[in-house]
Image (spheres, rainbow, N blue to C red):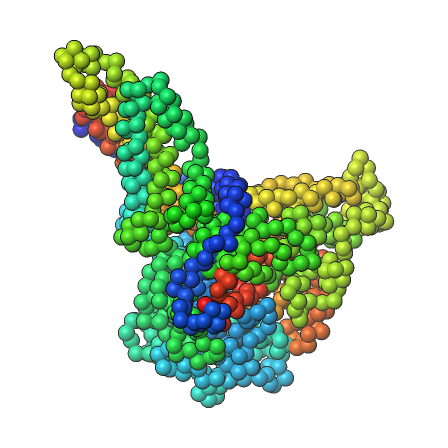
Amino acid sequence: MFRNRRRTRLARVAVVGAAVLLATGIAACSSSSGSSSSTTPSSSSSPSSAPAGAKAVGGTATVALPPSVTLSYIFPFTSIANVSSYNVNQFQWLMFRPLYMFGGNNTSIQVNYPLSPAEAPVYSDGGKAVTINFKGWKWSDGETVDAQDLIFWLNMMKAEKANYYGYAPGIAPDNVVSYSATGPNTVVVHFDKTYSALWFTYNQLAEFTPMPMAWDVTKLGAKAGSGGCSTDSAKDKWAKCVAVYTFLAAQAKGAASYATSPIWGVVDGPWKLSAYNTDGNVTMVPNTAYSGTPKPTLSAVKFLPFTDDTTIYTALKTGQIDIGAIPKADLPQKPLSQVLPTTNPLGSAYNLEPFYSFGFYYYQPNFDNAKTGPIFKQLYIRQALQELMDENGDGLAIWRGYAYPESGPIPTQPDNQWVPAVQKANAGQGPYPFSISNAKALLTSHGWQEVGGVMTCETPAKCGAGISKGQQLSLTYDFATGQQTVTNEVQNYKSDAAQAGVKVNLVGQTFNTIIGESTPCKPGPKCTWDVLWFGGWGYNGPGFEPTGESLFATGSGSNSGSYSDPTMDKLINATHTDSSLAAFQQYATYASQQLPFIWTTNEYAIEAVSSKLQNVTFSPLYTLFPEYWYFTK
Amino acid sequence: MVGFLIRRIGQALIVLFIVTVITLALVHLFPGGPVRALLGPKATAQQLAYYNQLYGFDKPFYVQYFKWIGQLLHGNLGFSDKLNQSVTSLMSQDLPKTIVLVLLGTLVSLLFGIPLGVYQAVRRYTIGDYALTAISFLGYATPTFFFGLLLVDWFAIQTHIFPPFAPQASSVWSILADPRALVLPVISYAFLLYALWSRYMRSSVMDNLVQDYVRTARAKGASERRVIWGHVFRNSLVSIVTLLGLSLPTLVAGAIFIEVVFNYPGMGLAFYTAALNVDYQVLLGFTVLATVATVVGNLLADVGYAILDPRVRYS
């Protein structure tokens, strides 16, 4: 998700070379447009009978989707070909509540039991079993959200795990030994070993979504449950579930019929679809049968697709939408210490809200590069490379103050339970704050000397294993072209690094080339990249505990640089088995100190919200909660 | 004539074969492969292998090619996993909206470009001619998207006369039902074309004005109005009509930028979004359709020329 945000912009400019001019043109237009305070956001259908400033019932909130994003997949058993934070967190979850909701109409990133259809899980058998009790919510067809609905999901996971985006070998459903409904509202799940309650709740139960019996069919109009998946077993190789999945996946492929489908019309969330067109215009209305609280007070939420952030800004300036992001170029410069700007470029028609992403950005070193891998394997060199990253300088100069330094695998903003103390050190710069002199001293104390302006290993015994005498500290950084902010960031880095004698060779690539290179490689003639600018990593599903198994565990799929450290592996494994927050903090502290990545500045967005639309906040997990929103008159 | 037709059709088929091979090969040139492009950076090796097999990318290239061509011959342009709809249905939904934009824009540009081009030719080297020439040059020089942005700023943001965006509707009828929202995109599109038509018309009329038949008409006592509109105008239109046909690909390309600036939900916007999202099925489908249209258009033009001018058949 996080990655998508930059990727979208990058790809846009890469594909259409004129995009820079486009942005320039819009910027010129916006700067000449004067005050927009006279604009009135599009609450054309906003309530009319309420007194001024009072909470009113009704009204349509119009929300701008981020550039090039469309809400395009409705089936919660989502394949990786269809997954995106928008499809899942901002579309499916409004209609189909997962077993446990995460985040809320605030900046929390924790599990939210009040908004979930099940009570908090109860772990037993020494952490090898969990009992889930449903609250008795109702589906919109009158059926109860109950144990059988969860069994239906679990059976489908067993049958079709390859088609579920969150699946990886060893985790659910592989680690689920058995499960059964012990009562109409109770399911007990047994695992293969003891797991951390924290990890299992945040990263495994978080993937489960009860599905209605109305979906357990193999043709339209069939009797609910007639598909047999909810009572299927491995005895027939899950044949019934395969048939039901095939039917549901085929239904999900018919996007044009989403709003009229009798399948997708059965919801347990606060919203249901009322209109959907495949251009990306989506309208949702309240599900009057929603069992949870709060109940929606708006009469509808409308999502509009846009191609460009500057187009969204135009929509804001002309009052066409109620919610949309303001491009940073159109925001006033501000100090890092301040969250919002002192002046609102949209005037009084809109309020401003920060939108943090629960993720981080980084440079990825290649530890398996035969030539430079030995260099990256030295912690002191990674420290020096981190100390050359002027995160605060970039935050001010490139992100106009709408950024904060990142210092480890846990986002430090907004404040959260996961972030270790070490990451908060040095005003958020962590254990290795920006210091060119420190970086230089670190290198010279390890046998490097500046020769012709480039650090050169003079004492191999001190430089480290695999580094030969005369080897220069010259590294190639592949970065994605097309986005000026990224180009500025790498150029700043090159400039600062040069002052410490580290030669950084910048090579611009398309984002897709970077993605193509990012597959972990074995040492050899094809494994030649040194460092990739890789965008970011977001913890916004399928798991919500920001553990490192995907990124830092030896041999994991997204460990593009082939980082490997037995201690790191041990600490990551501990987060899976030890329920204490301390175990997690140990991992996070170690990752921050060991620098498997070079952390870079974390930006955040500024969202404009119509001043008539109240109680809107932006979850760092990208989930929207329009049931909390209301208009005032 | 039959031999000529066979030769031309054979050439068209060869061009189509080469273009489709290149197009499919380009998909394989996505860094990391087409499945990596589809699934994104978080895809595991197992998922990549699964989807490579699912979509047949693990098969030899020629097998993939013939399977794809077989689908195309059955009218199946592919399925967009990003949008969850077939490329055919995407086109049938968006193409009519683009056609509306292109036709309206072209019509408006012709309504202004042709008579003003005639006026410029007749009143050449006058202040009026110079002023209109300057406007035409401005139209040539101004990037389409930039002119669109200026219109949005002037007429939507500053004065609120027109909405900044096109109607966000799925059907072509609902687009037409909101004519105010069509004004700015149509003007943007028309401005570019106006420059083209007026310059060509001016030049064509000036060429015709010195022809013998004009002198003859005047010698026979025809009024200047009759000479211009009855003789010169009709003959000058021939080049415009030819130009209209030949510039069709340019018209569609121009519509992409207009559709992006005005968030106009047509085929150009769909193509643009597909490019951003690496939705290769949509890109493939659009490219093939455009190729077929171009090849068929050229073929028809060749045949038309051959019918009109027999010398072409023997060249």
Of residue A553 and residue B277, the one placed in the foreground of this image is: B277
Q: Position of residue A109 (x, y in %)?
A: 59, 69
Q: Position of residue A356 (x, y in %)?
A: 59, 61
Of residue A384 and residue B232, the one placed in the foreground of this image is: B232
Of residue B140 and residue A535, the one placed in the foreground of this image is: B140
Using residue A488 as the reference point, say whether residue B235 is left or right of it.
left
Image quadrant holding the N terminus of chain A, namely bottom right
Image quadrant holding the C terminus of chain A, namely bottom left
Q: Residue at x 57, y 55 (%)?
A: A344
Residue farthest to the left, as pictured: B220
The quarter holding residue A569 reads bottom right
Q: Position of residue A370 (x, y in %)?
A: 69, 47
Q: Residue at x 47, y 50 (%)?
A: A314
Q: Position of residue A248 (x, y in %)?
A: 37, 68
Using residue A424 as the reference point, say whether residue B311 is left or right of it.
left
Q: Residue at x 38, y 64 (%)?
A: A45
Of residue A230 and residue A263, the one placed in the foreground of this image is: A263
Q: Is residue A90 above or below residue A155?
A: above
